[in-house]
Amino acid sequence: MCWSERISGRPDPRRGLAERKDRTLATAEPIVQTSEPPRFHLLGRLRTLVSSREILANLIRKEVLVKYKSSVLGVAWSMLNPILYLAVFSFVFTFVLKARVPDFAVYLLSGLLAWSLFSTSLGLAVKAVVDNANLVTKVYFPREILPLASVGASLVDFALQGAVLVAFMVVFRAGHFGTNLLLLPLAMLALLTFTSAAGMWVAALNVRYRDTQHLLSLALLVWFWLTPVVYPSATIAEFTHRHVLGISMFHLFLLNPIGDIVMGFQRALYGVVSPVTIDAAGHRVVNPVLLPVSVGWMAWLLCAVTGGSMIVLALAWRSFFHLSGDFAEEL
């Protein structure tokens, strides 16, 4: 009993109020505070992203500068990588496996251009949140900027590698230019959309499950050989009459979005479906290289991949948003 109760003989009303307050606090559900709004709204996040474009540009600049810091050759390394790939794969598929692909350099680099952007972006994005832990725990900004900055930094390498391919095509007068070039913007849009979706997904997962970055390396290795980068995409058409569980293996190959995008780049830049060469005896030899479909069919495929990638991007963005509120606690 408190002092006021002993004097007056009546219970102190303040004591009852304090006890009721303690009981209320004890039974109330804990309030979880995060750095993000409670609900995900796609248009709202897009507006937030646009308003934070300067942060995105600065992070892209930082990624590029850190990558080539204290490097003697600097950005020239990005141009040397496709040249090295070209030398190794040209030797293997010309002298060892003897794959007959005319202008093999153009075919290889056109597919490698798309694959490098995808794999490099994911390699940076999977560690984007973890490597910027100090920034995430101290400053508020839209967290999706981090994986998107990885894609933006990879676009710099993409531009440099694309310059190598264009220079090669001009010097050696390789490639075929026509309506097939119209596929290039479609393939680029599909590539950026799907890469951004995959980058957000692996970045969020790696914060909670650090094994994600190791599993990603293995997945990309398998994915590379399931994608017709170094072997003719025409070989996929040979699986039309082979089935797995009643499904054509050709259609199973088409379920690989990066494979479809790579074939779009190859059709846009390499151009010729079955180039004709003259052998030592003077006979005309038809060499099936690209998937034997029309430009319109390939455009329809790329549109389907783009539409599907936009749905995947929306789902990945929502998942990233819900997980990002706990990044500061998990880092």
Image (spheres, rainbow, N blue to C red):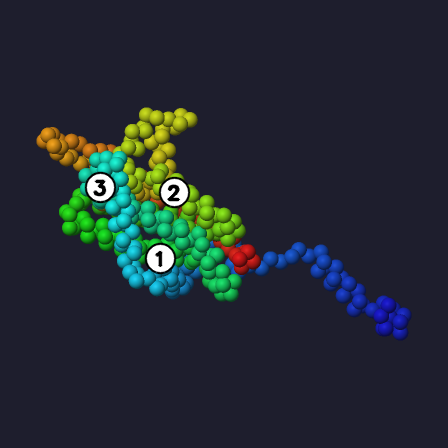
Q: Which residue is mark 3?
A: 104
Which secondary structure, mark 1? helix
Residue at (33%, 31%) from the top-left corner? 250
| Label 1 to label 2: alpha-carbon separation | 22 Å
Of the image marks 1 and 3, the number of the one nearer the N terminus? 3
Where is residue 255 drawn, in percent x and y? 37, 37
| Label 1 to label 3: alpha-carbon separation | 28 Å
Residue type, mark 1 in image? Ala
Which secondary structure, mark 3? helix
Task: Tell me if mark 2 has few (under 14), some (14-19) or many (20+) residues whose alpha carbon lies within 10 angstroms of its own.
Answer: few
| Label 2 to label 3: alpha-carbon separation | 22 Å
Nearer to us in this view, 264 or 132: 132
* Camera-nearest label, 1 or 3: 3
Of the image marks 2 and 3, the number of the one nearer the N terminus? 3
Q: Which residue is mark 2?
A: 221
Of the image marks 1 and 2, the number of the one nearer the N terminus? 1
Nearer to us in this view, 136 or 109: 109
Where is residue 278 drawn, in percent x and y? 12, 34
Residue type, mark 3 in image? Phe
Q: Which residue is mark 1?
A: 153
Quadrant housing residue 179: top left
Where is residue 47 drawn, in percent x and y? 42, 59
